[in-house]
Structures are given as structure tokens and as C-alpha cells.
Amino acid sequence: MPLYVYSIAAKDHPHRLDGVSGVGSDPSPLRTVTAGSLCAVVSDIVEEIRPKRRDLTAHQQVQELLMADGVILPLQFGYVATDDLAVRQALESNAESYLGALQRLEGCAEYHVRVSQTDEAPLLQQILQDVPEASDLNDRIRGGDRDPGLPLALGEVIAREVQVRQETLAAGLTEALAPFSREYLAHPPSGNDVLNLSLLVPEEHKEDLRTAEANLAREIGSGIDLRFSGPLPPYSFVQ
């Protein structure tokens, strides 16, 4: 029977999941498949599992409950194995890698940092003040110069400056936050984000990270939205 696989852990992990629902419209009980010193937390499935809210929530709840009792390797949503034998074979063939990853993630949680430009007006005003070329072009346009190339030239100068300043902001925030992590990973930003950063943070640095977050939120000024989330299962650092 196909299995939905949630995570991998050491065989001696408590796995306290009685009464916890897994994925699927009629969830099967959660159980473990063991091979050597490793085990996988699974549930039987009889349907294709799609990323619906209920199943996404169930997947995440299992990870968080397991993580509260010890280190785990959380699998991304949607991992399915053909049967118990396939899971055992995967555990056995990758045992060294999995055990190394468990050791590397011991005592850590993942934190996400996202930074977006919510209001460009303060940034644009600062560029006009700081960059003579932008200021001159803007003054000519406002003064009535009808040269059709002026708006395009001004737009190019501003776009270049916005990119440079956003990249500088992202680099500065990464440099400020990285010391609180054991590892960090920068993801490609999307939408209005200028930074999408994952941090693998040891428990002993959790409060220091929160203090740094509050300080940075005060320092970066208006028009910038700094969003932290965590502690989370360390999805980004499972290799």
C-alpha cells in the first residue's frame, strides 16, 4: 500500500503522535517504519494527496509535534513511497547521510526572514536628493523641458539606483543576521520582496535573533516591511 512520508528521525525519537490526524480525506493512523537506527513517520494512503489546506495543515502539524520532541528531517509536502519496503530501503541506503543531517540539525530550528519594499516614495525621494543625475533630470522635467527622452532617462537612473540600494539592504540584513545562525540560505526573492532568507538557528541564539530583529525593524526606516517567522521545521536545510 502507498505511504505518505512525513519525516525521518532517529529510532529512539519519542514519536508522540497518538490522536494526531495525518493527510487524506479519511486519514490513517500515523506509524513508523524502522531500519537500523533510523525511522520514518508515515501513514497509509488510498488517494492522491494534493496540496489542499487541510492536508497542508496536517503535514505541518505532524512536523511541529515531532520537532518539539527532538531533531527530525522534515520532508516537503507530497512525498509518497510505494510501500514499507521502499521506505526501509531508502533509510538503509542513505543512512550515513541521514544520520549526518540529524547531527547537523540537532538543537536548531529554521527561521524565515522576508523583506519587502512596501512604499517606494521615501526611497525615490532619497534618490532624487542623493543622485545629481536624477535630480537634474527631474528638475528639467518639472521645469517644462519637453525632450521626450528625459522621462526614460530618469526612469533608468532611478531603476538602477533602486536595485543597487535594495541589494545593499538585503546584503546588510543578511550580514547582520547570519551570525545568529549555524547556516543560512538566501532564496530568490519574489513579488515585492528584496530578501528571502532562511536561517538555521540554534536554540541558544533564538532570543538574540529576536532582539536583532526588533533592532533592525527600528533602524531600516519607513517603506520597508521586515517579516520574521519561526521557529519552523528546518525544511531548507535537509540535504
Image (cartoon, grey):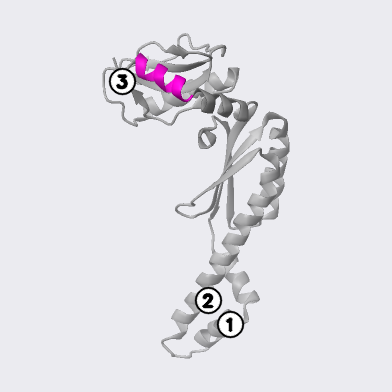
Which mark is on residue 143? Answer: none
Q: Position of residue 37 (x, y in %)?
A: 53, 14
User: SS class of the residue under badge 1?
Assistant: helix
Q: Are marks 2 and 3 in contact (CB under 8 Å)?
A: no
Q: Which residues are magenta?
A: 84-94
Q: CA distance from mark 3 to mark 1?
A: 63 Å
**Is residue 22 among the parts visible in the rendering?**
no
Which mark is on residue 133? Answer: 1
Give the amino acid at mark 2: Val
In magenta segment, residue 184: no
Residue matched to label 3: 82
User: Is residue 119 or residue 79 the one in the foreground?
Assistant: 79
Q: Position of residue 212 (x, y in %)?
A: 71, 44
The count of marks equals 3
Q: Is residue 123 left or right of residue 83?
A: right
Give the amino acid at mark 1: Glu
In magenta segment, residue 85: yes
User: Is residue 157 or residue 86 the one in the foreground?
Assistant: 86
